[in-house]
Image (cartoon, rainbow, N blue to C red):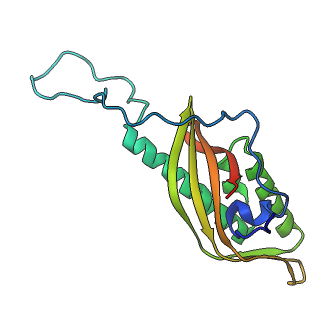
Amino acid sequence: MRPPSSALLLPTVLLVLGGLSACNGDPEPKIADPTSSSPSSDTSTTGGGPTNSPPPSDPPTSEPPKSARAARAAAIREWSNESFEMQRSGDSTRFRSLSHGCESCDVLADRVDDVYASGGRITVEPFAIRGLKQIAATGPTFIYEYTLNSGETVIYNRSGKVDERFTGGRERFQMNLRQLDGQWKVTSLTRIAQ
């Protein structure tokens, strides 16, 4: 088993604690169907003059597929950015609000809280998410994979001495995402063996 090489986001702290684990209750991945060739049901027509029909009382509740996919990708990037900010600042509030039932997310937030509560701090170098790809959808859960390229992360104790140092590197992850209360939330994150 090789030592942890990634140094940001979840790899930073969770690898120290023994690795990432999937959360209970999340569906197993199923490969998504290829893009459908059937026409979209969101097409509309124009013309014909005024009608006596009232406008719909509620706006449509689903986004067109492309914007829904973009919204999920944006949620993943927001979650990643908040992970970075949480480690830098020690404030896990926003990061915690972006997940639901994700054990590995909670473990990371708890570890960061512990470091800062004991008077320590964490420095993190920039990171990049590469190859973000939806690989499946099971009911309301969307399953993504990506590569995290991260820089060095250092955890300092209260006296300013280095407790742990991670050199950074490349790691693959699988993430489950589900919309809850109108917001995309991470429900599971697992490191993929390389």
Please tell me which residue lies in front, 20 or 105: 20
Location of residue 146 (image quadrant): bottom right
Q: Is residue 14 visible in the rendered structure shown here?
A: yes
Quadrant in the picture for the C terminus = bottom right
As drawn, 84 above or below 69: below
Q: Position of residue 30 (x, y in %)?
A: 57, 34
> Which residue: 39% across, 26% down?
58
As drawn, 120 above or below 32: below
Location of residue 12 (image quadrant): bottom right
* Residue at far left of view: 48
> Which residue: 80% across, 69% down?
3
> Which residue: 73% across, 59% down?
92
Q: Position of residue 176 (x, y in %)?
A: 62, 43
- Is residue 136 rendered to the left or right of residue 105? left
> Which residue: 60% across, 74% down?
126
- Is residue 110 rendered to the left or right of residue 33? right
Please tell me which residue lies in front, 167 or 42: 167
